[in-house]
Structure formats: C-alpha cells, structure tokens
Amino acid sequence: MHSSTCAGLALFFSVLAIQQTDAQTYRGKVVRMFVGSPAGSNTDLLGRPVAQKLSEETGGMFLINNRPGGTGIIANEIVAKAKPDGYTLLIAPSSSITSVPHLHLKMPYDSLDDLIPVIQIGTSSNVLVSHPIVPVKTVEDLIRIAKMKPNFLTFGSSGVGSAFHLSGELFVHMANVKILHVPYNGVTPALTDLLGGRIDFLFFPYVVIRPFIETGKLRVIAVTGSARNPLLPVIPTISESGLRKYEVNNWVGVFAPKMTPLVTVEYLSNVIQSILVTPELRMFWRNQGVEFRSNTPKEFSIIVRDSYDRYGKLLATVGIKPQ
C-alpha cells in the first residue's frame, strides 16, 4: 500500500475516533449554555434552536440558561470561570465580547483570553426606527433636524456599550450632529419608551419589532448593515442614504472557557456548523433576518479580535472612557 494512502486512512480513522469519543462524551450529559439577555431577546432566539438541535445530534441535554444583566458580564463571567470540560458554554452577541470590556477599568475576566471562540452562528443588521409622531421619514430628514436643533432629538439603547448604543454613536459621529443618548437597563424599557413617544429613535433588530412596524406603531427609516435587509427590500441602508461607509453588523457566537480541549472545541464547531446548514435552520435564520457563513474556531477568533479593536477605536473616538 502506498504511503500516501496509509497516511490518508490514518487521518480518516483518527478523525472518526475523535468524533465518536466526543459524541460519547456528551451522550446523556447536561450542558449549560448561558445567554446574557432575557428569554425572547435576539441572542436567545438564535440560541434556543441551536441548543435543541445539539441535544438531538449528540444525545446530550443542551439547556439555555438566561442570566441577564451587566450588558452580558454576568453570563460571560460564569462561563469564563467555569470548568473547561465542554459542559458549560456561552452564546453571546458581539457587543458583550468586544465593546463592553472597553467601558470598564476592571473586568472580572478577559474576554479575549478567558473565552475561546467556537463558532459564529449568525450576523445581522439593525434598523433605525422612530415613533410616528417624529417628523422624520429619511436619514436626510434626521440629519437636517439634528443640525438645526442640537440635542433636541433622542435615541435610546439597552445600555452603554450595547450594539444599539454603538450604532447610534457611530451615526452621530459620522453625521457630525448632536443627538441625546438615553441608556436603559435592557431592551424592554427602551422599546416601551419608544412606543410611548418618550424617546425619538432606536437602533433595533427588525424581527423583534416587526409587529409594531406592521401595525404602524413604529416607522422604519433605514438599515444599519452594508446591504439591505431581505425582509425589508424597499428600505435603504444608512450608507446609501448619505452616510457613506456607515456599517454596523451584529454577530452572535458560541464560546467555551479557556483551556477547553481543542478537540472538544472543534467537535462542537463542526456539529453546530452541520446544524446551521440544514434547510430547517437556514429557513429559520432567513426569517430572523440572520445570515450564517461557514467559519472555523480560528476564523471566528480573527473576527472577534477585529471587532474588539474596531469598537475600542470607535468608543475612544466618540469620547467614551472606561470607568
């Protein structure tokens, strides 16, 4: 037998052995997947079908544990300090991993060193929405009024350093206007005040507020991503509306504690990837306005590092300092 054939067979059987070993490792075991936001949040909505399919594929019990608070710090810390045995995982949005650390002088963990990126499960953009009473229908309208009346208009967010906050700060910076930021403790009170007309704008996931848009309670102005949302094909991006190169896309990913064996990380990444390319999950993601692109733990690590650096520069540019 040729040496190349022997080498190929050896690799095949070694990979097969790894897959079988890890499948046996999870069979009948409970795996906690922490989410740093409430049930029904965007991250939670993406995490639950992944957990369900992981349970079916591995024979384990992958359970979502919601630990809201601290813009993700509570859940992130639990996982960062957990035993690295593959039975404690984190599902987190980009903001809690890459922007929140820049807001604190002291963190109970290092998001780059204490959490291992496993796989990015989806990316999406937000929409800029307003209360109908606000006399703004386009980005041009918004910029014009903001220039005429500095700090007259307001935009809310789920907290300082959240993706929604950063979307607004980038807009304010690029448009060279002054719009007052109103931070809330979570998405629910922010949305409640927008619906009540107590704030003017929000940057928010479309699928979460879709019912309010369809009933006329909120107005969509633009999309934050580099391309139009397929669920809103007639709504322009902020970039094509005048703020060239404006782009804010959010991602959600799975993380494991530092020192989790590489074989376990790669196994989880491969299984989740196989789940996300099924027709059922592709359809669900599409209906959520989320895109999945195949990626490895190494590729996701690069994305995390790039996002961390980019948000750090943005926060410094707009004058937000760690406290």
Image (cartoon, rainbow, N blue to C red):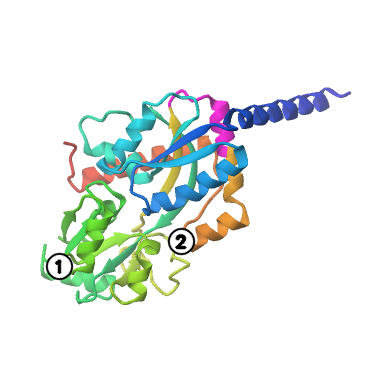
Classify residue 194 as left or right of residue 151.
right
Percent of width and height locating residue 112: 37, 31
Lower position in the chain sequence, tag 1 or tag 2: 1
Quick check: is 198 in the magenta stretch?
Answer: no
**Quadrant that contains the N terminus:** top right
Residue position marked by numbered label 1 in the rendering: 147
Q: Say if 285 sits above or below 103 in the image.
A: below
The amino acid beneath tag 2 is Gly
Q: Say if 146 sits above or below 310 in the image.
A: below
Does residue 87 appear in this view? yes
Quick check: is 262 in the magenta stretch?
Answer: yes
Nearest to viewer (mark 1 / mark 2) = 2
Percent of width and height locating residue 81: 36, 26
Classify residue 306 as left or right of residue 271.
left
Residue position marked by numbered label 2 in the rendering: 289
In the image, the segment drawn in magenta is 258-269
Does residue 112 appear in this view? no
Question: Secondary structure of the magenta portion, mostly?
Answer: helix
Looking at the image, how many numbered discs can be counted on the residues? 2
Task: Please name whichever residue, 45 or 178, is drawn nearer the observer in this view of the structure.
Answer: 45
